[in-house]
Image (cartoon, grey):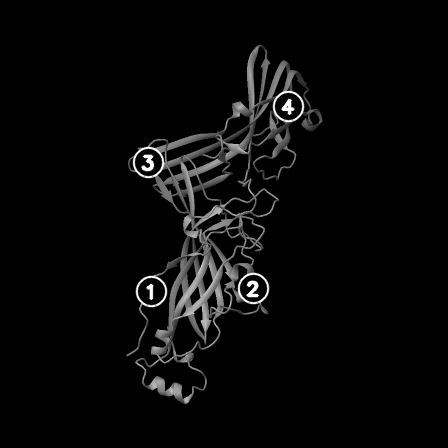
Amino acid sequence: MAQTALKTSLSLGIRLADQSSVFAPGDTITGHVFRGTHIVTPEAIVTVALFGRVKTKAISPLGNKSSRQTLIDEQTSVQTIFRGPLHIPNSPSPDEVEQKWPFAIVIPAHVGGEQAFPGTFTTDRPGFTSNDRALIEFGVTAELQFTENGTARMVTTTLPVTIRALSLDPPIADFQHVRHRIYGWVSSSNLLPAAPSFSMRAKMRFSSSTRPTFAGHLEVDSPTIIQLEHPDATPLRLRFVPDTKVMSSSGLYEVPGEIELTSLTMEVQATTKIGGDDADSPQATFTPSPVFMRVWSPLALGPGTPSLHIPYSTDNPALNIGELANLRMGYGGLIGKRFSQGIIYPSFAMRNINHAHRVVFNLQARISKEVLDFKWETDMDILPPSDSRGPAVAWPTNQALQSGSPSEMDEELPPVYQES
C-alpha cells in the first residue's frame, strides 16, 4: 500500500502559489495547471479536483487486508478551468510557450458530514513478516482531455498536499487534571543535620533504624488533555507530602532541607489501531517510537539556571513547573526547542484508524545530596491546535472533575527500607 506520489511533467503539471504551504481546513489552495509541450486540438478540457482518503493495511496469520475510505471525493470537488481549442507550438524553451490555467479550491471544514477534519497522517510497522500501515493523504489532481487525430486522449497530474488538523473552537481552558500520589523514600546518614542536637542523638539511639529515612508522597496535578500550539503553558503542579510517621520512626523528625527538582521528562507514546471494513478483517496494533522531551533540567538549560524547589508544606502553593518551564507542545514536540523531538499527531478515531496517546513522566529530585526518583503515567488526549483567535473557553469536564478539584490516583506504596 503506497502513498500517493508526486506525478508531474511538461505534458501536465500543477504549481501552487506557495509551494511550501501547509494547509488547514477552510483554507483556499491557489495555483495553476500548466502544459509546456506541443499540442494542437480543436477541443481540450482541463479539470482540477481535491482528493482525500484513508488507507490501511493489516497483516495477520489469517491473511492480509487493505481498506480505503474516501474523505474528499474528487467527483464532488472537480472544477473545469478550461474548455476550448488549444495550440501550443514546438519550442526548445517550454517556458516561453507554456500555457497556464489558474484555479482556487476551498478545503472543506469537515469530512464525511460533521466528522472533524483529521489532517495528514502516516504511521507504519515495517518488518520481515509484517508491514502494517495506516495513512491519511490529501492532494490536488488535474486532467487534460483532448482529441488527437480523432482519438480521445487524457493526461493526468497529481500533487500531494499537507493538511494539518485544526480545531474550530477557541483554545481550551480546562486541561482536566488528575492527581497522582507517588510514594518515594531514601535512607542515608546524609539526611542528618551537620550538628544534630543532644535530643536528636538520644532519639536516634533508641530508634529501630540505624539510618534516618526521608519518605512521603509526591502529589502531582497532571493534565489529561494537551492542545498542540496552545498559547498558554500547560499547568503541571508539584508538591511533596512527608510521611512523618515513617520519618520519626527512623529518627528523622523534620524535613532535612530543600527538595530540589533536578530533572523532569515526558515520553509521548502513541498507539495506533487499524482494521478493515468488517469485523472479521485482520486487526493490528502498533506503537511507533516514542517522542522524548526534556521539560526541565538545569544542566540542559545551561549555567545560571536557578534552582527549583518542590514545596513540602500545604502552607505554600504547589510548584507549577508547567508554567515555569513554558510547557507547550507542537507537532514537533516542545515549542521553543531548537530541534524537533519527533512528530506528534493529534489523537483521533475513525472507522479504520484509532490513534491514542499515553504520556510517561519521570521526575528526579534531590535532598541532602540524596536522589529521589518518581514515575507516573497518564492517558492523554492530544487535541489539534485551535484556529480561533477568541478567548479561551472551558473544555467539557468529566464527571469525576465536576467538583473543581483534581481526582486522585494513588500509586502503589512500596515497602520502606529499614536496616536491621
Residue pointed to by mark 2: 301
Residue at left offset 32%, top offset 71%: 416
Q: Is residue 230 visible?
A: yes
First in sequence: mark 1 vs mark 3: 3
Residue assigned mark 1 = 413
**Residue at numbered disc 3:** 282
Q: Dot 4, how many residues are within 10 Å of its Cα: few (below 14), some (14-19), or many (20+)? A: many
For mark 3, give the secondary structure.
loop
Q: Any mark on residue 37, and which? A: 4
Q: Residue furthest bottom?
A: 198
Q: Do callouts 4 and 2 mark residues in contact (Cβ within 8 Å)?
A: no
Dot 2 lies on which element? helix
Q: Observer-nearest residue: 40 or 164?
A: 164
| Left or right placement of residue 148 versus residue 360 in this view | right
**How far from the left and from the top, in percent, is residue 106?**
59, 30
Mark 4 or mark 2: which comes first in sequence?
Answer: 4
- In which quadrant is the N terminus drawn? top left
Q: Is residue 411 above or below residue 400?
A: below
> Mark 4 and mark 3 in contact (Cβ < 8 Å)?
no
